[in-house]
């Protein structure tokens, strides 16, 4: 029997716009981009609000189930503690089978070091003061910001390359975000606090 070829994902239809012929058309395009950025923001905000609503509804349904789950678990633990010797055959059985329902067990996790955030500096000071340097880890990393201020030094260091990315930037009036094109890769993205690559895959 001949196999049916896997269905291919349809190619995305990439819209094309004619190149503006005048500075007025050029400005109209930028105004349109500003409008589109606003519409994108509106849709994204609506999607986030819808997601919040879905999460709230889901939590209302999940909450009672979580409560019963915990109640069942507590009841099981109470029973298991009263029958521990019998269930574990006086602690000789580590994993107790509960038939086809599953298993239970008592265990203690391996030791782990816990340091409260507020105590971290005091702990480090104590270790250094008492010459416990083997318990202090120093992270060494390249200060790229400092090297950025000394490009002549950076370019002379083996393994370091200095990139200068040519970009075409469109920033519509009244907007905090902008649209950028990386002229090396021809990739477009919306740039604000977070970046969104908007280059169609078929481009």
Image (cartoon, grey):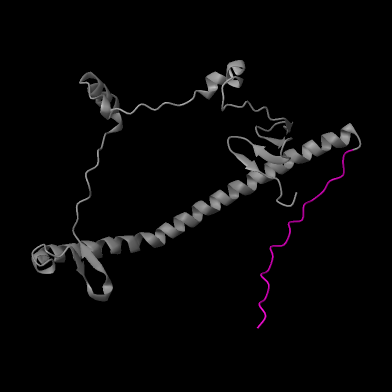
Location of residue 28 with respect to 199 vertically, above or below: above
Q: How many numbered tags mark residues here? A: 0
- Tell me if residue 136 comes above or below residue 64 in the rendering: above
The magenta region covers: 1-20
Residue drawn at x 83%, y 37% as measured from the top left: 28
Q: Left or right: where does residue 42 sit relative to residue 202? A: left
Question: Outermost residue, front direction?
Answer: 158
Where is residue 144 shown, x and y percent of the image? 53, 24
Q: In which quarter of the image is the N terminus?
A: bottom right
Relative image position of residue 143 (x, y in whole percent): 50, 23
User: Could you say which is closer to the camera, residue 152 or residue 130?
Assistant: 152
Q: Is residue 201 left or right of residue 145?
A: right
Residue 186's image quarter? top right
In the picture shown, does residue 38 fall above or below 80? above
Residue 116, image x, y percentages: 27, 33
Residue in front for this viewpoint, 201 or 179: 201
In screen coordinates, is 34 left or right of 120? right
């Amino acid at each position: 029997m001949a196999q049916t070829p896997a269905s291919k994902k349809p190619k995305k239809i990439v819209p094309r716009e004619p190149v503006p012929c005048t500075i007025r058309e050029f400005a109209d395009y930028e105004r349109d981009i500003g409008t589109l950025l606003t519409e994108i923001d509106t849709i994204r905000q609506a999607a986030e609000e819808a997601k919040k609503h879905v999460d709230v509804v889901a939590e209302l349904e999940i909450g009672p189930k979580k409560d019963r789950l915990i109640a069942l678990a507590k009841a099981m633990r109470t029973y298991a503690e009263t029958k521990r010797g019998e269930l574990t055959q006086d602690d000789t059985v580590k994993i107790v089978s509960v038939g086809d329902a599953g298993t239970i067990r008592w265990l203690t996790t391996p030791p782990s070091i816990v340091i409260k955030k507020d105590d971290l500096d005091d702990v480090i000071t104590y270790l250094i003061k008492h010459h416990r340097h083997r318990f202090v880890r120093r992270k060494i990393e390249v200060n790229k910001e400092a090297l950025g201020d000394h490009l002549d030094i950076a370019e002379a260091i083996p393994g370091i390359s200095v990139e200068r990315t040519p970009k075409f930037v469109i920033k519509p009036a009244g907007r905090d975000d902008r649209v950028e094109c990386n002229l090396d890769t021809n990739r477009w993205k919306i740039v604000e606090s977070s970046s969104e690559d908007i280059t169609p895959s078929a481009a």
